[in-house]
Amino acid sequence: MLFTGKGGVGKTTAAAATALRCADAGLRTIVLSTDPAHSLADAFDVPLGSIGSPITDSLWGQQLDAQERLEETWSEIQDYVMQVLGWLDVDPIEAEELSVIPGLDEIFSLTDIKAYAECGQWDVIVVDCAPTAETIRFLSLPDILSWYMERVFPVERTLTKLARPFISKLTSLPVAGDDVFAAIRRFYDRLEGVRELLTEGDRTSVRLVVNPERMVIAEARRTYTYLSLFGYRVDAVIANRLLPDEVTDPWFAAWKKTQAVHLAAIDEGFAPLPVLRAELAAEELVGLERLRRFGALLYGETDPAAVLHDGNPLLIERRNGEYRLSLQLPFTDRDDLDLGRVDDELLVRVGPYRRALLLPDSLKRRTVGTAQMEGDRLEITFVEKGATA
């Protein structure tokens, strides 16, 4: 289960309480943070390490140390980057800092999630993701890296090998050797299968945490769209920090009325997703007992480890004699949508994000017939080459 939302909405609290409730039910649970600004340890009020630390008998927690992972898996690549920066007369300390490519911490997190899923030690893995924009980048990384490794990496490696003798005669610029490319290959191999794991709907789901505020809801709607674009299944929305009915002071009357309007918009806009509700707590939600109370109020009789909504962001089927690809894109304005095709790939862009869908054999031999939005889904038909639609 991956928890995300706009910064400050309470996603860490929701993730921590969910993990604790799963563990209290007897499930072997690990909760990890992919947010560079970790607050998971603060929520539990216990120290957490980068390799997993026990919180209760059935619950462990982890806060990734990107520098530690860097030294383990990135050192050969980092050494080469530092050589290039040194050749450019960059100060050694600055070169060391610049050699850490932005986004590496997200990649390390992906490898950890895969390792935990494959080891068989855990029944539930809960991920406290970074705020929404970083989460979208985090979850799009498997697609981007796969595209690079399949199309660019082999060409780049071959050209570098061929050009290395000539470059070394013309300049002292360090040229990547086979050891660097081998390190990149090993690094990527650790990610193999991550995308399949995270988009497998009966195993993995995303839960969006929102507050009843206009800007928060708008960002959650966009996040839902982009997650669907990349094939990630959202199974619930958590509406957090609702003013309780016990608050009757007239000063809060307008606030409660506004919250009721926004809550109705959440129920209607995200339907048929279930909306779990959590009231604004009277105390800071820190420590096991307070998190337990929050989890009990949030889930009630609902199993927190269950998939709470069964939907499919991407469907390919034959309907009425034609092949159709259906992609769930909730809250999408057709003006923000672009569609194209290059060879065996269907290119779909929504706002600033683009996904390249590798078409199956049944669709590769056909051309795009029609494409239109039907409700919250993009419906694309494929016809035999030369046929008209």
Image (cartoon, helix red, strand yellow):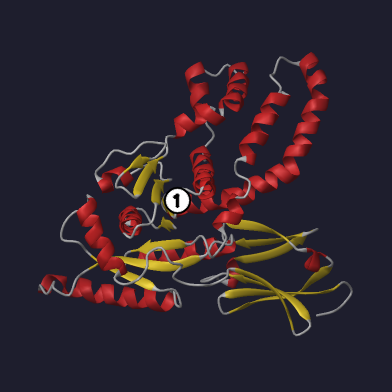
Question: Residue furthest toward the right?
Answer: 386
Q: Amino acid at mark 1?
A: Trp
Q: Quadrant for residue 386, please give it.
A: bottom right
Q: In front here: 295 or 358?
A: 295
* Residue 369 falls left or right of residue 304: right
Residue at the image position 45 percent from the left and 51 percent from the top? 122
Q: Is residue 226 above or below residue 260?
A: above
* Residue 332 falls left or right of residue 188: left
The image position of residue 98, as x and y in percent, is: 52, 28
The answer to whether residue 298 shows anywhere in this view is yes
Number of numbered discs visible in the structure rendering = 1
Residue at the image position 64 percent from the left and 40 percent from the top? 189
Residue at the image position 33 percent from the left and 73 percent from the top? 262
Q: Is residue 61 above or below residue 9?
A: above
The image position of residue 152, as x and y in percent, is: 73, 41
Q: Quadrant of the C terminus?
A: bottom right
Q: Quadrant of the N terminus?
A: bottom left
The image position of residue 200, as x and y in percent, is: 57, 61
* Residue 280 falls left or right of residue 373: left
The answer to whether residue 219 shows anywhere in this view is no
Q: Secondary structure at mark 1?
A: loop
Residue at the image position 81 percent from the left and 19 percent from the top? 165
On the image, numbered disc 1 is attached to which residue? 122
Q: Residues within 10 Å of mark 1 (few under 14, many from 20)?
A: some
The image position of residue 334, as x and y in percent, is: 60, 72
Question: Residue furthest toward the bottom?
Answer: 320
Question: Residue furthest toward the left?
Answer: 249
